[in-house]
Image: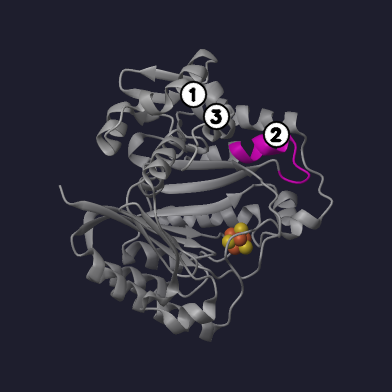
Amino acid sequence: MGKELSIYVHIPFCQKKCLYCDFLSFRANREQIRDYFTALRKELISASRDYSGYRVISVFFGGGTPSFPEAGEVCETLDLISQCFDVSKDAEISLEVNPASAIFDKLCRYRQGGFNRISIGAQSLDDKELKALGRLHDSETFLETYGNARRAGFQNINVDLMSALPGQDTASYLQSLKGVLELEPEHISAYSLIVEEGTPFFEMDLDLPGEDEDRLMYHETKRILKEHGYHRYEISNYARSAIYECRHNKVYWKRGNYLGVGLGASSMVENTRWSNVCDIHKYIEMSGSDGIRENLQRLTTNAQMEEFMFLGLRLVEGISVKSFEREFGRDIFGVYGDVIDRYKRSGHLRLEKDMLSLTDEGLDVSNTVMADFLLDDG
Ligand code: SF4
């Protein structure tokens, strides 16, 4: 089997910045957006020369708001990827959309243009909470966008939902969750809000739910989604069946090869990581040359083993003991025997046949457990 590659395309534009957002995104005028897409295409053409032996199994347009620019720009970029790379016929091709900008016509263009998965950032179905987040859409717009995505022919839809929001309590969160469940999306991503430094939220005096309430929302999410037939396959991700698990994100967690194109996008191919510059002027000016790449780093074996553990353990299925040995030529228990034993005894880890995975209790405190998989000189 040939080598596999996933492609991430970053679209850094948003109509308005949300108050909690720490993604690389900003407002831009038409001219800047047009120049950016021209630069993106240059980068894709130039990068494709290095990946002629690779088969592309997933493409993901994220942001920012990929549904903010003209649909034509986005679809032409996808077209170019199909021309320059060997994209598998059954590749998962996703686009993130914001309900405020994803109108029916655009959704039809995306579907006709080859996208087969849409991820809609609902976040909440409570208008007060959406306003507090600084989102541009309200719940009605989200519901309309969801219906439009179905009418446009999307049979694989993800909905993003957030908990622990300002002014939110468990009852209002569960209302949102139930509202989303009534739509029967194929996939749900459920995250708690993290207030990041450098965002307006960080400076504000927010009325956030307490830790107990936050935990209650988290546990109720697991319980209710399970009751409705969604299986949890990653800490925050649920799918209606295995075919709807996000193939693209699983490449990150399983340390597959991915090429990130666009402003600030990260890549990892054959254990070498790098990222693109975050300055849009520099990116537009230098795209198509190696000048846009920085932080190039060949991962040491220790760093690879660490990543194998703490990315792989995010998946509910866990990691394969044999794969570890195949990849690193070392026995996993020789490297991590002490920490595995300790967490098995405490009930946070389980070993079943070849698979080592976090238990439910382990997933609840995954950050603490994973930190113990760091090696001294990794
Ligand atoms: S739409 Fe998404 S990327 Fe844009 S500002 Fe809001 S959270 Fe950030």
Sort mark 2 into few (<14), some (14-19) or many (20+) by Cα contacts within 10 Å: many
Q: Please identify the dominant SS of the magenta region.
A: helix
- Residue 167 forms part of the magenta stretch: yes
**Mark 2: amino acid:** Asp
Write down the residue under mark 2.
214
Residue at 18% over, 60% down: 53
Residue 147 is situated, as x and y percent measured from the top left of the image, at: 49, 53
Q: Is residue 78 above or below residue 341?
A: below
Q: Secondary structure at mark 3?
A: helix
The quadrant of the picture showing ligand 1 is: bottom right
Q: Looking at the image, which is closer to me, 286 or 96?
A: 286
Say whether disc 2 or disc 3 marks the residue closer to the N-terminus. Answer: 2
User: In this picture, which residue range is highlighted in magenta?
Assistant: 165-177
Q: Amino acid at mark 1?
A: Val
Vertical position of residue 21 compared to residue 167: above or below? below
Lower position in the chain sequence, tag 1 or tag 3: 1
Left-right relation of 328 to 166: left
Amino acid at pointer 3: Val
Tell me which corner region of the image, top left, top right, bottom left or bottom right, holds residue 302.
top left
Residue under label 3, please give it.
369
Cα separation, mark 1 vs mark 3, equals 9 Å
How far across and down, in percent of the image, does residue 344 sit? Answer: 48, 16
Expressed as whole percent of the image width and height from the top left, the position of residue 208 reads 78, 42
Give left or right: position of 270 versus 314: left
